Every structure is written in structure tokens, then in C-alpha cells.
Image: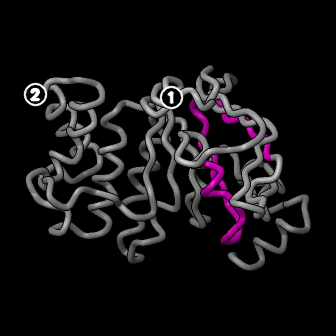
Amino acid sequence: MIEQTPIIVAQEVHKWYGKFHVIQGVSLTVNRGEVLVLMGPSGSGKSTFIRTFNALEAYQQGRIEIDGITLSHDLRNVEKIRREVGMVFQQFNLFPHLTVLQNITLAPIRVRRWSKVKAEELAMQLLDRVGILEQAQKYPEQLSGGQQQRVAIARALAMQPKIMLFDEPTSALDLEMVREVLDVMRNLARDGMTMVVVTHEVGFAREVADRVVLMDSGHLVESATPDNFFTNPQEERTRKFLSQIL
């Protein structure tokens, strides 16, 4: 059940890389418990946009508020927000010299100051939740791509975030591994996690998203329910995009 309570509020956000205006006045609100899927062609600014939500990318104009905290240059605010926002990337970014268990417990021990026993207990619960409990003592190179991405999801969840951001989490995976990662994400959505997902997985968007948004050339083009987005798009740019991916 989605609460009509905003947890992410972006207002007129602009970002430049030098002279390149990558995000051009984008406004977006995500409610607590909502699953929002962000779609668009390569280079549309969608990945850059969600990376501003946890200050992995700085924005130059506008305002972003995460669960009531304004994202500014104040490092104390950045630290607070990063504690509440988990992120899963296209590349798994696991530490190769650490076991699966160590990868997951590292941040809770160092950042949240948890005991090793408490962190490991939660890590094992999360590994069970993502379906790879038996891989706890292995190293990343011993796992398939799908298993590594599920470890990355468990690692993000270990910080007990209020929001999960996914930046094309299946695009580096072989087709047979995509489903196992999407299944984990489906379960997170059913559990009520607030999620913003950059993806081209149409089936996932149709089934799981509460809302689908199209970005193009740094602009937010259209925002609609999955049914309306895929079957009755209002914007010509959306229709053109869908004709290329469906």
C-alpha cells in the first residue's frame, strides 16, 4: 500500500557537465512505498538523475529533499541521506578480496557501528532472502553474475535503507540471470520498499511499477501508470520510444 507521503522530492533540478546540460529542470515526487521505473534512451540523463538522490552526482540548481532532509553541500546532510538510501549499480562493485559475508557486513560494522555478530546475523538473513544463503563464504569471482548482483542487493539492504535505487541492475547480466535478480526486486516491492529503478525491462515495469517515467535529453517527458504508459502514451516522444523497445 502506497502512502501519499512524499519521500523523494526533486524540484526544478539542473545539472551540467561543463557546458553539457544533462538534467534540465526536472521535477519529480516519489511517495513512500512507491515503485517508480525510469525509462529512456541512452544518454537521456536518467542514471545521472537518480545518482543525485544520494549525492553520487552533484546538482547545480533546484532542490532535492530525501525523507525531509534537504540534499545540500552540508556533508552532515549527505551522510544522513546516504544512510537511508541504498543503491545497486549496473556493475556489482563487490570487493573481490572479501567473502560474500564480509562484503555485506562491512558497512553496518563501520558506518552503523554494529557488532560483528549482529551484522553477520542480518547478513545471513538477507542472503536467505535473496536466495543465496549457501554462498556466504565464497568470494565474488566464484559466483555467477546474477549471484553477484543479488549479493550487491543484500549489501545495500544491510544498511536497512528506506529507499532503494537501482541503476540498470540487469543490463550486465546474461538473459538467464536477469530473472533471478528481477525476482528479488519483485519481492522487495511486495514488501513495501520505496524503489526507483532505471531499467529497460518492460515486463518488470508492467508488473511491478506503480508509475513509469520517460526521460529524454535531460527532460521528464511523461509520467503515467504502467497501463497508460505502455498502451495509451500521451506524448509523441513516448510513442516513438516504445516503438523501438516493444
| Residue 1 colored in magenta in the image | no
Residue depicted at 75% across the width and 40% down the height: 28
Residue depicted at 54% across the width and 36% down the height: 194
Q: What's the residue type where badge 1 is placed?
A: Leu
Q: What's the residue type where badge 2 is placed?
A: Val
Residue depicted at 15% across the width and 46% down the height: 101
Which residue is more in the foreground, 71 or 16?
Answer: 16
Crowdedness of circle 2 by 10 Å Cα count: few (<14), some, many (20+)? few
Instruction: Give yes or no for contact between labels 1 and 2 (Cβ–Cβ under 8 Å).
Output: no
Residue 135 at x, y percent in the picture: 14, 56
Residue 111 at x, y percent in the picture: 30, 29
Crowdedness of circle 1 by 10 Å Cα count: few (<14), some, many (20+)? few
Point out the image quarter for the C terminus. Answer: bottom right
The residue to which callout 1 is attached is: 75
Residue 125 sits in which quadrant?
Answer: top left
Residue 181 at x, y percent in the picture: 39, 59
| 1 or 2: tag closer to the N-terminus | 1
Magenta range is 26-50
The residue to which callout 2 is attached is: 117
Which residue is more in the foreground, 203 or 134?
Answer: 134
Q: Is residue 140 above or below residue 129?
A: below
| Residue 34 colored in magenta in the image | yes
Residue 117 sits in which quadrant?
Answer: top left
Residue 92 at x, y percent in the picture: 35, 60
Q: Is residue 161 above or below residue 203?
A: above
Point out the image quarter for the N terminus. Answer: top right
Whether residue 232 can be seen here: yes
Mark 1 or 2, closer to the camera: 1
Residue depicted at 59% across the width and 42% down the height: 35
Left/right of residue 139 with respect to residue 111 in the rendered view: left
Q: Secondary structure at mark 2?
A: helix
The CA distance from mark 1 to mark 2 is 30 Å
